[in-house]
Amino acid sequence: MARVELTLPDKFVFEATLSVRVSDLNYGGHVGNDRMLTLMQEARVLFYRSRGIESEVNLEGDIGQIITDAVVVYKAEAFLGDELKIEIATSDWNKYGFDLYYRITNQHNKEVARGKTGIVCFDYTKRKVTSVPATLPEKLQA
């Protein structure tokens, strides 16, 4: 079976440190695959807030985001009490959206996972896909 490969960008524009909680663990005693996506979302929300963006549904006015795809490539286990550094990069900007890349390492600087989420801008009032707000690329790439 072919493995998914994910090449990360060279430049990351944000980092957050999150602690692995007991609720993040699965029956194997390590961070579950569903929880890794939740940790990535937590870091994404912190990233947006650091750029003055209220929430994922309010990137600008009624324009928010929807996730169109997600990829996680696991490199190592993460355990209760680990401090995970989650770095975020933006890439692949187009008329309707962009990609966010995540590099997740533990307190020993060991890579735990890599991730990518495809983001499409969405007008929550009109309930339809819309163009990226003009100021968003500058806010997120700074």
Image (cartoon, rainbow, N blue to C red):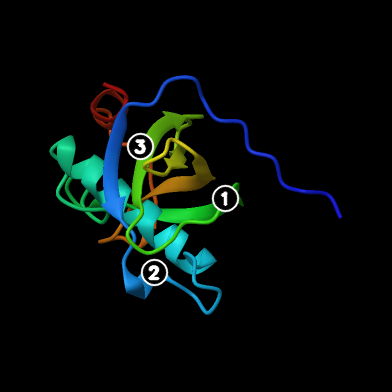
For mark 1, does the 10 Å Cα neighbourhood hold few (<14), some (14 to 19), or many (20 or more) residues?
some
Q: Nearer the viewer, mark 1 or mark 3?
A: 1
State the image coordinates of residue 88 (x, y, percent, origin top left): 38, 36
For mark 3, does the 10 Å Cα neighbourhood hold few (<14), some (14 to 19), or many (20 or more) residues?
many
Type of residue at label 1? Ala
Disc on the earlier residue, 2 or 1 = 2
Residue with the mark numbered 2: 24
* Number of numbered discs visible in the structure rendering: 3
Disc on the earlier residue, 1 or 3 = 1
State whether residue 59 appears in this view: no
State whether residue 120 appears in this view: yes
Residue 90 position (above or below residue 28): above
For mark 2, does the 10 Å Cα neighbourhood hold few (<14), some (14 to 19), or many (20 or more) residues?
many
Residue with the mark numbered 3: 132
Secondary structure of residue under mark 2? helix
State the image coordinates of residue 73 (x, y, percent, origin top left): 61, 49
Which quarter shows the C terminus? top left
Q: Nearer the viewer, residue 4 or 120?
A: 4
Secondary structure of residue under mark 3? loop
Q: Which residue in the rendered view is the most extreme toward the front?
A: 108
Q: Nearer the viewer, mark 3 or mark 2?
A: 2
Residue with the mark numbered 1: 76
For the residues labelled 2 and 1, say whether their Cβ atoms are less than 8 Å apart: no
Type of residue at label 2? Asp
Q: Nearer the viewer, mark 2 or mark 1?
A: 1
